[in-house]
Image (cartoon, rainbow, N blue to C red):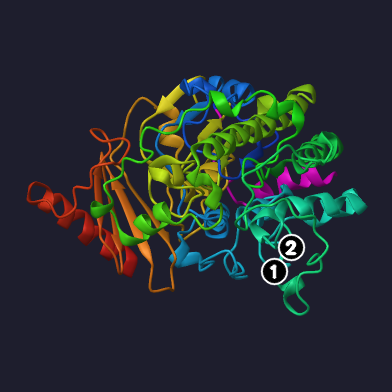
């Protein structure tokens, strides 16, 4: 008897009923899962959504064959807490990976543990930002350190691109590796004249075939060819782009000219007297990239962002091609998302860390053959904490106890039916500057522990330029959302 046969027969022999898969006609082999991830992909930055600049033909193809969610949110607009929520199904104050330097607690199990116990081979190829050396349940893992081993002496080129230690960009992948003796690249990097710690961007000097995106795509295809037909698998394929450094290969940089980029409509138009102090300070003092006060530099960075996005999109397509070539696509759930967005000059802000839509929103596309009608869209506000229970239900696995998120399968079956849901997010926990967000219906309320609150009606003010907090006409709505949010925080 093969391992696969044993895994399929053992539950029945023991008198245990396997939960039915959400697939219309469940095959003998359980569905596989391919979870495609990027880093810092703005919501709606897809050409299928009519974006005037973004070029994402491969993600567009995925959206045509699945369901895309128009109001999907991360749980925390920064890498580590958001990724922990994605894999555990828990909000930050429950999984306790509070920031980019907090290791994920060992006792908080991930989807790799749950799928592994059900007989799946679990693989993580690319970035996950675990902070320490725990594998968190994955059987097969390749990440930044494996890429550096592949690069060899060419790792120097990446150290130059980053310019300083940055675990969010993978160097070092684990902060503690450099904590005792400092940055080993200090004094050896080639200076590029940047005014802050983050470069505005340029064409990468790393050959395209050697860049992290190419490495992740190539190794993901290798995994599928080697292991994809042997047993059911959960493969997390996680790219870095379009996260900084905004240094795409020359082929993609040539597609986007700075002079063709428009500054956001909200650029220079924010009423600084009506936003929290931390927002005002970030607009007035952009310390990571002070050059971006210059509109020409801002346009250049915008162009390099979309070039990086296009490069990621093409590499994600290579993995989807392999899935189809191996005849695995008909029995594989494919989910694409990102860990958070990127402001990219909206409100005069850059990077993430805030609760405005371009930062806390994420793209979310799910292709589940036989379940989700192809090409559909859902307007239901949803959260990345719902990914784990969704994948479990689609694969016929019991939902783990104690999760914060509920399955999205009802939305996949009836994407045109917008449900009344409540979505939360939080940031900077365990600090005096903690802040929290609640989205219900068309309203979003943001609570700051030591700053001005925000309330926006997203249907009437999608750019979030009119803060309604403190206005008497909206006092009942503000009090209702604040009370619900404070109750959630205390849970």
Residue 165 vertical placement versus 25 (above, below): below
Residue in the image at 51% along x and 51% along y: 399
Residue 9 sits inside the magenta stretch = yes
The answer to whether residue 14 is seen in the rendering is no
What label does residue 172 carry, if any? 2
Mark 1 and mark 2 in contact? Answer it, CB < 8 Å.
yes
Badge 2 marks a residue whose secondary structure is loop
The image shows a total of numbered marks equal to 2
Residue in the image at 85% along x and 44% along y: 2
What label does residue 175 carry, if any? 1
Residue 234 sits inside the magenta stretch = no
> Which x, y percent locates residue 213?
74, 39
The segment highlighted magenta reads: 1-23
> Which x, y percent locates residue 272?
28, 51
Is 22 or 174 nearer to us in this picture? Answer: 174
Residue 458 vertical placement versus 49 (above, below): below
Q: In this view, does 387 lie to the left or right of 118?
A: left
Residue in the image at 74% along x and 62% along y: 172
């Amino acid at each position: 008897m093969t391992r696969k046969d044993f895994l399929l027969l053992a539950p029945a022999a023991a008198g245990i009923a396997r939960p039915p898969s959400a697939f219309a006609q469940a095959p003998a082999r359980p569905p596989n899962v391919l979870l495609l991830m990027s880093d810092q992909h703005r919501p709606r930055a897809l050409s299928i959504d009519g974006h005037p600049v973004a070029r994402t033909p491969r993600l567009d193809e995925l959206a045509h064959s699945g369901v895309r969610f128009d109001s999907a949110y991360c749980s925390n607009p920064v890498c580590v807490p958001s990724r922990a929520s994605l894999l555990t199904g828990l909000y930050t104050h429950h999984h306790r990976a509070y920031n980019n330097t907090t290791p994920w607690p060992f006792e908080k199990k991930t989807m790799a543990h749950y799928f592994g116990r059900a007989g799946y081979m679990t693989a993580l190829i690319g970035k996950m930002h675990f902070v320490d050396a725990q594998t968190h349940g994955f059987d097969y893992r390749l990440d930044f350190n494996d890429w550096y081993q592949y690069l060899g002496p060419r790792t120097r080129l990446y150290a130059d691109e980053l310019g300083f230690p940055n675990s969010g960009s993978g160097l070092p992948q684990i902060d503690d590796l450099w904590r005792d003796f400092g940055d080993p690249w200090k004094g050896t990097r080639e200076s590029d004249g940047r005014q802050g710690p983050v470069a505005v961007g340029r064409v990468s000097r790393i050959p395209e075939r050697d860049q992290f995106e190419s490495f992740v795509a190539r190794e993901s295809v290798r995994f599928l060819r080697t292991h994809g037909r042997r047993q059911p698998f959960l493969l997390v394929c996680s790219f870095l782009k379009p996260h900084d450094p905004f240094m795409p290969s020359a082929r993609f940089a040539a597609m986007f000219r700075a002079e063709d980029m428009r500054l956001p409509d909200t650029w220079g138009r924010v009423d600084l007297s009506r936003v929290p102090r931390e927002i005002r300070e970030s607009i007035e003092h952009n310390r990571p990239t002070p050059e971006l006060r210059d509109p020409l530099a801002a346009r250049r960075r915008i162009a390099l962002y979309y070039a990086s996005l296009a490069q990621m999109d093409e590499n994600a397509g290579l993995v989807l091609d392999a899935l189809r070539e191996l005849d695995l696509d008909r029995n594989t759930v494919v989910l694409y998302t990102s860990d958070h967005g990127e402001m990219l000059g909206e409100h005069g802000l850059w990077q993430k860390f805030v609760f405005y839509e371009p930062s806390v929103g994420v793209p979310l596309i799910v292709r589940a053959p036989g379940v989700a009608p192809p090409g559909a869209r859902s307007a239901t506000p949803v959260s990345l904490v719902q990914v784990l229970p969704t994948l479990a239900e689609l694969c016929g696995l019991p939902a783990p106890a104690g999760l914060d998120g509920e399955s999205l399968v009802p939305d996949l079956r009836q994407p045109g039916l917008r449900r009344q849901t409540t979505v939360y997010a939080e940031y900077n926990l365990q600090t005096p500057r903690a802040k929290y967000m609640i989205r219900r219906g068309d309203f979003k309320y943001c609570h700051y522990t030591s700053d001005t609150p925000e309330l926006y009606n997203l249907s009437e003010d999608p750019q979030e330029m009119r803060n309604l907090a403190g206005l008497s006409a909206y006092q009942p709505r503000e009090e209702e959302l604040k009370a619900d949010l404070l109750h959630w925080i205390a849970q």
